[in-house]
Amino acid sequence: MTDVQNAMTRLQEALGYSFEDPTLLLRALTHATWLNEQRDRGSALDERDQQRLEFLGDAFLGFTVARFLFQRHPDADQGVLTEMRKSLVKGEFIGAVGEELQVRGLVRLGAGEGLQLAKNKKVLEDTVEALIGAILEDGGPDAARAVVERLFLQGDLEAVFATEDNPIEAFNTRWQRQFKESPPKPTYSSTGKDNAATWTAQVRHPAGHVVTGEGSDQKQARRTACAEVLRTWTD
């Protein structure tokens, strides 16, 4: 067995899925820059790149994560569920999954632009989504759902939601976990006009008082207020 075959076997073991059609796995690992480069050299390869599989995998990943959160948090409202879903399907998280799967060295990239893309986690994100799409095509929705749940929906999910970079998500998740109800909605006010406006958000503290935060828009004001709530929140 060659080194490439060994690497492919290890990848399938990491995914927890073995492909019936190996060409789908290879397609998921084929970047457009590699295929374009081969064609520019006059090669008549009868292959496709990963883009269509990436499209399919992206949609299926979003659906599976959304359904999981919908069932796991029956009392969470749309806003809370949306923020949770964003945390799990954002590029950085998908890229981290790609690193764990060690797909970077397996993606077929062109020598020109591809070398630059190899340094960018966007390649990993696209490839992980393409792999999900390939599994969906090869084994159906049950197989793809099992892989998504294994890669994205196990472990300490609360730690994913409650990061310092996402105080709104952290506030919503902690409130939901502690009180078993949707968090209270913030209220907003502004001073100034147009681009010079300053927004103020008021967020209810679990202790009962209101915490305010300011920013150049509603989201920034809310982030500031939520960060302050988290700083003084004691269970």
Image: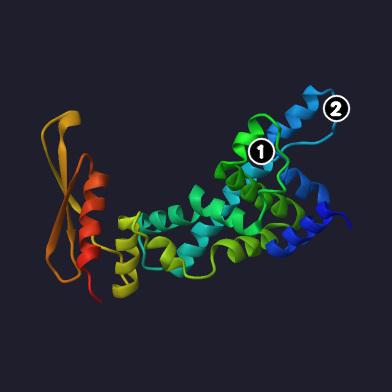
Neighbor class of circle 2 (other Cα within 10 Å; few <14, some 14-19, many 20+) is few
Q: Which mark is residue 43?
A: 2
Q: Position of residue 234 (x, y in %)?
A: 23, 74
Q: Which mark is residue 231?
A: none
Q: First in sequence: mark 1 or mark 2?
A: 2
Q: In this rendering, would 132 be left or right of 168? A: right
Numbered disc in front, either 1 or 2:
2
Q: Which residue is mark 1?
A: 51
Q: In this rendering, would 230 be left or right of 33? A: left
**Where on the picture, by quarter, is residue 209?**
bottom left
Vertical arrangement, residue 154 with respect to residue 56, above or below: below
The N terminus sits in image quarter:
bottom right
User: Looking at the image, can residue 197 be seen?
Assistant: yes
User: Looking at the image, can residue 21 be seen?
Assistant: no
**Where on the picture, by quarter, is residue 138?**
bottom right
Q: Position of residue 159 (x, y in %)?
A: 42, 66
Label 2 element class: loop
Vertical arrangement, residue 67 with respect to residue 4, above or below: below
Q: Position of residue 118 (x, y in %)?
A: 62, 41
Q: Position of residue 120 (x, y in %)?
A: 56, 41
Protein image colouring:
rainbow
- The amino acid sitting under disc 1 is Gln
Neighbor class of circle 1 (other Cα within 10 Å; few <14, some 14-19, many 20+) is some
What residue sits 71% from the left and 50% below the top?
Answer: 134
